[in-house]
Amino acid sequence: MNRNWLSRLCNNSKSRIGISIVSFFIIIAIIGPFFFPEPNAYVDAPLLEPSLEHIFGTTGQGQDVLAQTIAGSRSTLFIGLSAGMLVVFLGLLIGSIAGYFGGRADDLLSLLINVFLLMPGLPLMVIIAAWLPPGPYSILSVLVFTGWAWNARVLRSQVLSLRQRDYVFAAIINGESNMRVIIYEIWPKMISLITSSFIGATIYTIGAQVGLEFLGLGDVNKVTWGNNLYWATNDLALLTGSWWTYVPTGLCIALVSFGMTLINYGIDEISNPRLLSERLVKEKYPFIFNRNGSTPVVRTSPSE
Amino acid sequence: MSPSVRYLLNRLGFYLIAAWAAITLNFFIPRMMPGDPASIMFANFRGKLKPEALEALKQTFGITDAPIFSQYLDYITHLFKGDLGVSIAYFPQPVSSVVISGLAWTLFLVGISLILSFAIGTIIGMYIAWNRDGKLDSILPPGFALLSAFPYFFTAMILLYVFGFKYGWFPIRHAYSSNITPEFSIPFIMSALYHVFLPACTLVFMGIGGWMLAMRNSMITTISTDYISFAKARGLSERRIMFYYAAKNAILPIITSFGMAIGFALNGAILTEIIFSYPGQGYILFEAVKSQDFQLMQGIFLTITLSVLAANWIIDILVLALDPRTRK
């Protein structure tokens, strides 16, 4: 079942493009820095335009932009992916407790989730990050502390609906412990939702991390994508028109997020029964779709 | 008490709890952090304030030798008097006046761009959902997905470079020309609109995609309902069905998500303002971070949170007024 799901994901054209883009950047993040061991080294005059010698030009401090872009990918992707994982895990934990046990626990946790959802993320992150010693791990903890609520809300409602299924009742009546029911009966059924939540969370953590570092709240001596943009504005790239100091990094961030969004589209297409059955109908009976401008009703099961 | 009033009071209670949570976080965050918050917080005041004044300031933040609970009460009492301390970045102005001047510009920027992106996004979403086999439906959603994958401030940087720097069509900083006095006059309003154009464009571009997708999906669900088929069977015109039967119902759930969107738009506005040196909350927050002005940062967090909560309550009232199904 799970292998089937993965192979269907790889066969979906959208997610295949997304997976290629993301893997490309992950490979760069792993091996790239070995080719550019000293991205902060002074290599040439500052703010040189892109040329054969420096394909992406040089920064305001005479560093090679290509080297900085590649070296920056490692820290940004590593913190982004691990924060994404932690965010989803925390969200899954809180969402599962709230959705499975219901009652008072659910009331309390839902209140907490809703309060965190309403609080504006960036200012909250800033006031926490400003107190912590600058560095990637401070940023990681800030991202996890402020980012879990959305996932908790989405995963909670899924747990809540699975909780009502007969097979879960059967497992409980069989005398399985609550922990076991959640981990072995409920979570495996949520693989696609957990995966897409993880990808969504990673898009968020990469964006928020870059934003925080751009504000100068990271360790500004480290080479990361956020810091590249921080130094670009600090060295007045905007007022001198040296676009090459921030465009490569910005494009990389956008491509990674876009690739991840595509993977999520793919997951949605293969696991959303509505979209799936609509596509199957479309393949089999294309003429239905040309009859009028409306979408044929794909009947959902009466239990929903 | 009518059910609608009870519902609104219920929501108000929730927002009050959220506001209390924000205030409490604001109080406890410095105290939970490693190091000595008082000495970090006030280190930058040395040489700027007299010792008595510094003592008074510590009182404001409840940083005294008293037990933590009475510190907390102290803090809340000062808060209710509107006393948020003194800013370092804008010394000697009090935090409250710095924050309020910034709030006005941020609300102006976010208000304009939210309304525009909502209007444009829902109209496009409605249109592409109605013509689902059309070209636009296969181009626009992935196109905007790519656009919204860029960080807000990156889009802002590109717009600033191209239209502000390269072509010089729009100003690249501040909220109005320095030779105009801020007053309620036509030249001032024109100048403010001219300056807000590029930052607002950034937020609108980044915001449209979300509204468009939400509206498209909501429309698709609405289109497959029976009353749409019935309207078609009656031979009503396509336009009439699209606007008055489908879109009118599809837009209601979107308005409900407006509250959440305000939070996202504010995050984007903060970063965009920094790029355009637009004197709103975000720019002030950036100045506060640069000069380690903790009072100012916390003041901004509080005012932004409170305005998001207030906006959400207004949206609750709006939804209640617009959607008869919520008024049972």
Image (cartoon, grey):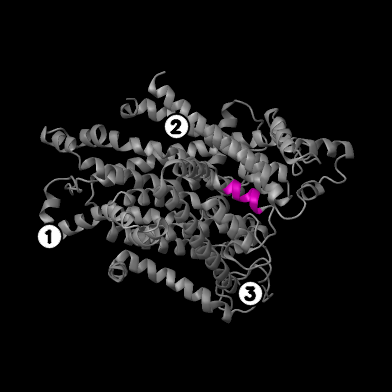
Q: Considering only vertical position in the picture, is B288 above or below B102? A: below
Give the class, few, some or many, for how many residues have Cα within 10 Å of label 1's Cα (few <14, many ≥20).
few
Lower position in the chain sequence, tag 3 or tag 1: 3
* In the rendered image, residues at marks 2 and 3 fall on the same chain: no
What's the residue type where badge 1 is placed?
A: Lys
Residue in view at x 74 percent, y 33 percent: B74
Residue in view at x 61 percent, y 45 percent: B282
- The residue identified by callout 3 is A39
Disc number placed over residue B315 in the picture, else none = 2
The quadrant holding residue B227 is top left
Q: CA distance from mark 3 to mark 1?
A: 55 Å
What's the residue type where badge 2 is placed?
A: Ile
Give the class, few, some or many, for how many residues have Cα within 10 Å of label 3's Cα (few <14, many ≥20).
many
Q: CA distance from mark 2 to mark 3?
A: 49 Å
- The residue identified by callout 1 is A284
* In the rendered image, residues at marks 1 and 2 fall on the same chain: no
Give the class, few, some or many, for how many residues have Cα within 10 Å of label 2's Cα (few <14, many ≥20).
some
The quadrant holding residue B250 is top left
Which span of residues is magenta-colored?
A: A122-129
* In the rendered image, residues at marks 3 and 1 fall on the same chain: yes
What's the residue type where badge 3 is placed?
A: Pro
Principal SS element in the magenta part?
helix
